[in-house]
Image (cartoon, grey):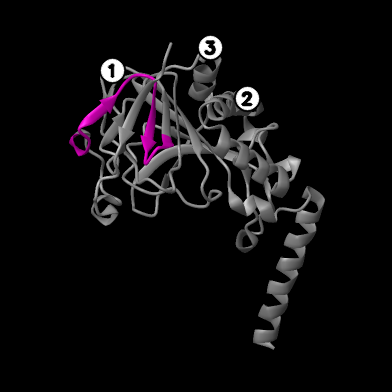
Amino acid sequence: MAIKSIHAKVRNVNPKEFKERSAKPEDCSTLVDEDCVIYVDGRVAVVYIAKVDEDVREFVEALGRVNYSKSYRSNGLLTTSRIFGYAPRNAVRNHPCRAASLAAEQPDESNVVQRFAEVAQKYYQLHNPEVSSTHLDMTDENVKDEYRIGKTMFTSGIINHNNPLRYHFDSGNYKGVWSAMFAFKKNIEGGYLALPELDICLKCTTGSLTLFDGQSFIHGVTPIRKLSEDAVRYTVVFYSLQQMWNCEMPKDEISLIRQKRAEVELKKRNKTA
């Protein structure tokens, strides 16, 4: 079956007017609920698959068992989410490059979620072979195998649980490549992905996959209305962090952190001497 094509024009909007405010359905005049490729200036900008071919039941069940944590984003919005995959070095907190805690705390759930990185990569390569090839080459050349999800180009990911995220740009990913977002809904009305610059909202139905560059297009989630007590909306986003390029082998990461810690302690002693 042929996939629908939409040729969009970037609207002359001021991202500052959208940034950090809640998304609204009326921010977009077009709601996309079927497979489509969105073009901007003749180039593929967004791919939306309304339902992937793969069986997602195990995926959804795993998401339901994950232990989520609440945190405040920089804009003050309380969110419920869980990081997976790999995290870069954080010398301030004495954290080496490492696997996210989900792998140790809930390895079965982590493995199920991470397996779908291969599904995301398959659709990415099918619909945007040029950018996906560049993305994979960047990971092959710059990221050690110990810090990538399987053999894919992705290093990291986040699971969002009922998060009506305000408008934002993604940050920290490789430049000029895409992220991949799976969505799952149960008894939910709304929760669309809004792309106001393109005047398009994506419905984000259960089993859908959205591929685009979240660093280039401002995006947010429209209000999530629960239609029952057990209603839920999950999104699972796979991405590649450029800071992972700086990661050494795990044993060397420990040495680096110890060295940084010793340098900090030495500076403290010198100040008090």
39 in the magenta segment:
yes
Residue 123, image x, y percentages: 53, 25
Closest to the camera, between mark 3 and mark 1, is: 3
- What residue would you read off at disc 2? 115
Q: Which mark is residue 55?
A: 3
Return the residue nearer the eye: 257 or 190.
190
The amino acid marked with disc number 2 is: Arg
Return the residue nearer the eye: 225 or 228.
225
What are the residue bounds of the magenta stretch? 26-45
Point out the image quarter for the N terminus: top left
Name the residue located 63 percent from the left edge and 37 percent from the top edge. 153
Q: Which mark is residue 84?
A: none
- What residue would you read off at disc 1? 228
Query: Can residue 146 be spotted in the picture?
Result: yes
Q: Is residue 109 left or right of residue 142?
A: left
Say which element carries label 1.
loop
The alpha-carbon separation of the residues under discs 2 and 1 comes to: 30 Å
The amino acid marked with disc number 1 is: Ser
Q: Is residue 72 above or below residue 266?
A: above
Q: Could you classify mark 2 by the number of other residues whose Cα lies within 10 Å: few (under 14), some (14-19), or many (20 or more)?
A: some
Residue 233, image x, y percentages: 38, 26
